[in-house]
Amino acid sequence: MIVTLCTGCPLGRSDFGATLAAALAAAGIPARLAFADCMSGCSRASTIAFRAPGKTAYLFGEVTAQDLPDLLVFARLYAASRDGTLSDARPLGVLRAKAIARIPG
């Protein structure tokens, strides 16, 4: 899985990328962190995307450092999903209301 942070957004300009990478590794979730100059989510700044080959991709906005636990839950469920589709978004907490797009794989 590739997790991409927008470096044009406040969260992407902070040290959150290193925090997220360390948390994913500590949780045993295989992911590669990437950065993009702009992900065009400016109306809901601080965007983060999750994608993997053959899976639905997700874009979240208005993400804060306090969302880290929910991001880890999402990453774990996403990694375990065959096609990236989650049958129940309730475990995602507030993150489920921060989804901007779900892009079929």
Image (spheres, helix red, strand yellow):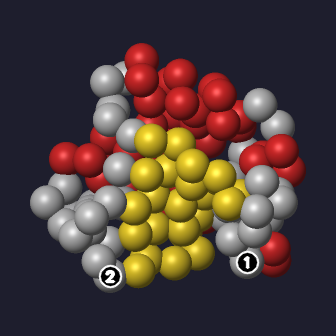
- The spot of residue 55 in percent (x, y) is 26, 68
Q: Which mark is residue 4?
A: none
Give the amino acid at mark 2.
Pro
Outermost residue toward the top in this view? 26
Whether residue 31 sits left or right of residue 6 in the image: it is: left
Compared to 41, does 90 lie above or below?
above
Quarter placement of the C terminus:
bottom left
- In front of the other: 82 or 98: 82
State yes or no: discs 2 and 1 in contact (Cβ < 8 Å): no
Q: Which SS class for mark 1?
A: loop
Whichever of callouts 2 and 1 sits on the residue coming sooner in the sequence is 1
- The spot of residue 56 in percent (x, y) is 32, 72
Question: Residue, x 42% and y 17% (percent of image)?
Answer: 26
Outermost residue toward the bottom in this view? 104
Q: Which SS class for mark 2?
A: loop
For label 1, the crowd category at 10 Å Cα-Cα, with few meaning under 14, some 14 to 19 and many 20 or more, is few
Question: Residue, x 32% and y 60% (percent of image)?
Answer: 52
Whether residue 68 sits left or right of residue 66 in the image: it is: left
Separation of residues labelled 2 and 1 (CA atoms): 18 Å
The quadrant holding residue 72 is top left
Question: Residue, x 53% and y 22% (percent of image)?
Answer: 22
Look at the image and tell me whether residue 85 can be seen. no
- The spot of residue 53 in percent (x, y) is 27, 64
Outermost residue toward the left in this view? 82
- The spot of residue 64 in percent (x, y) is 72, 45
- In front of the other: 67 or 18: 18
Q: Which mark is residue 104?
A: 2
Whether residue 47 sits left or right of residue 80 in the image: it is: right
Look at the image and tell me whether residue 80 can be seen. yes
Q: Which mark is residue 40?
A: 1
For label 2, the crowd category at 10 Å Cα-Cα, with few meaning under 14, some 14 to 19 and many 20 or more, is few
Give the amino acid at mark 1.
Ser
